Amino acid sequence: MSTPAIRRRTPKSQRRKDGLIQYAKDITSQNGEDGIIEAIFQRIPPSNTNTTNTTRYCVDVGAWDGKHLSNTHSLLTPPDSCWQGVLIEADPHRIHDLKQLHEPLGNLCIHSTVSSNVNSENSLLYILQHRANHVPKDFDFLSIDVDGSDYWLLHDIWNPPTSKEQTYRPKVVCIEANPTMPNDLIYIPPRNDTIRHGSSLAALVELAEQNDYVLIETTIYNAFFVPQEIYTKHFSELVPDTSIEALREMTMGTSIYQLYDGTLKLWGCKKMLWHNMPMDEAKLQVLPPQKRSFPFAPQTSSMAESAFFKSTSIVVDMSAYCKDSSSQQQGNEKEESQEAAAVKRECASEIVRQLKYDGFVLVKGTGMSQQVCQDALDNTHAFLQEADESVRRSCLTKDRARRGYSPMCTENFASLIGEDGPNDLVRKFRIGPTTIAEIGAQTERTEEISAASSGTPSSSPLHSPNVWPSSEVWDEHSSTAFRNATETYYERICKVSHSIVQAICHGIMFEEHQSNPDQQSTLSSLQAIASKDISDHTSILTLLGYRKGTRHKKTQKKRHVHPLVAAHTDVGVITVLLFDGGNSALLQRKSSPTNENNDEDQWTNVTLPPMVPEDPIFVVNIADCLSELSNNCLPSTLHRVMPGSGVSPRNCLALFVGLQPQEMLHFHHDHDNGQQDGTIMTYEEWRKRRIAKSQAVLESNKK
Ligand SMILES: O=C(O)CCC(=O)C(=O)O
Ligand SMILES: [Fe+2]
């Protein structure tokens, strides 16, 4: 059997059927209320039996047209009725019909909203006191159905704001309870007329008990209460057990259960009761299908090795965004069809869904050609692995910009998270942007920019000349090919990564908007980043080369394998990685505690296909700046490079995406006390602070 068997069994019910519910019948009511009300009043004599006046009074709050689903119609309309009604309705159309029906019968129809604001002239208390003062305080029947603040209306007639006012104590109260709320939930809605939540039966029972009322029956939507003394006198035999369990069966409840693999399942009512829409189990999920597995299942080594790529890596197709970037340049932006917009939206949501989970995602459909990628990897291999060290040393990194070659063991990524550790066992070569867009054109801003970056705009180390291996040391052909392949890859991957950043920004903004449609966005910087062109970015392409043979080894205790690149987070916006199938090094990210493992120290391998496919696949990970700009909705996940199982050299092309130095960023902070504020600074400033912060941690560690 490959699908589960799911059936319903009828549980043993504690619900008693021998009380008032046995009299259930509908004339105009919805779920048997008419019969129950009749049976109740057969047992309660009119107040003034000793006089000739046997009039009974009812108040119907939310009376509609006086007939539709009415609980008072069958009391008020018979020709010889002893009932007099006060019927309150807010809707102008319904009040028209209500008056037509009830005014000829001598009932009072009041056109008014009924407010949960107890000091308002629309409060039920005020309306009863001032517009229906013929109604005795202990009138016979109160029916409340206003689909929102019902709880508070009842609360306030029982508990007037000043002790001078007499409380109303109707002999019978019928009030709506939200039928989807479980018996053990006490849900008291906010005291606000515009909020429509309903209250739970348990909340109403609690309120009733506080006011000496007793629950005597329920229907699907309504609960009936009588004062304690009336209960004792007239109902204690018919309704000996007044517990919620004895008087209510949950028939509209929805429950959620969890499968071991993290799938959420719905049970019970799967319909949106007031919207007539099905609940979508797929939309309810916390984990995407490909991330669902049991965290504590015993792992076989073959599973760990081979199944990883298949089972945990969904590759997000970015074509909606990456193709779009070319048409946008042709100025077709406005004409984007609805369909295309929907595809982009889906793409943006999917990439964010993945990234939110672990900060890493695989992407394809970028429009990058296999040839450009393979060329760049091959030339990286030629330079970092095969060429003589003298070739690499001919373009050594000299300045703060660190363009050019950084030999093995000269850098230390542990420092990025403020940790001390041996230098990284990797060779690197960097290129970056060399030109700076016409900042001078924005003349009026030049001064403040210079002030902010304490120097001329071009003094940013992010904009510097690239350095290339000398053709005197490396043959002309190799050095030209290396430069061409690297520059081409750089130019293309910068564009692609901009589209990816756009998709991510859009995805987070959609999400924020969906969960908080009325609130002003706290993500203004994302909006700005997504809409910028990229002429002035500061993205750096780093070629990384790893090989077998680790110098740290001797100093290490047995079994302890030291990383080649220490655990760190990336500093910029996002990082876009492409690596070859070399097996001497392995990228790992910190495992997400929710699914893969609960152990703090677990790492998950990040792998790509060993050969660049026709539609190349890239690893994208969130870096610190975007994580902060997203209000930490996207994690900047710790990652490291470990020695791999084999001896083949491994090469990696890492694009560290950076914004333009003067981009103004708005960081939002939520404080524990619920307050919010923000900081505005340029990207350059943020970067300096970020680096300074980790260095400060390092300094204080040394002390
Ligand atoms: O080589 C890799 O796989 C990733 C290296 C890395 O994380 C980095 O340089 O920031
Ligand atoms: Fe990194």
Image (spheres, rainbow, N blue to C red):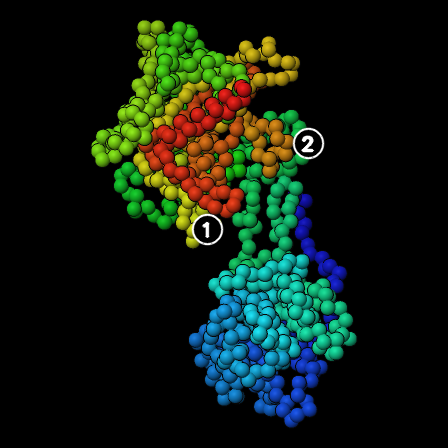
Residue nearest the viewer, comparing 352 with 157: 157
Q: Which mark is residue 686?
A: none
Amino acid type assigned to the residue bearing label 1 in the image:
Asn
> Which disc, if any, is residue 516?
1
In this picture, residue 382 sits left or right of residue 642: left
Along the viewing direction, whichever of 535 and 114 lies nearer the viewer: 114
Left or right: where does residue 337 sit relative to residue 199? left
Q: Residue at x 69, y 85 (%)?
A: 45
Disc on the earlier residue, 1 or 2: 2
Q: Find residue 333 and report its horizontal and vertical position in percent.
A: 30, 43
Residue 36: x and y in percent read 67, 77
| Residue 443, placed above or below residue 459 | below
Label 1: how many residues lie within 10 Å, few (<14), some (14-19) or many (20+)?
Answer: few
Identify the residue shown where x is 72% and y is 76%: 229
Q: Residues within 10 Å of mark 2 (few under 14, many from 20)?
A: few
Where in the figure is residue 403, as x and y percent of width and height? 36, 18
Q: Secondary structure at mark 2?
A: loop
Residue that numbered label 2 is attached to = 298
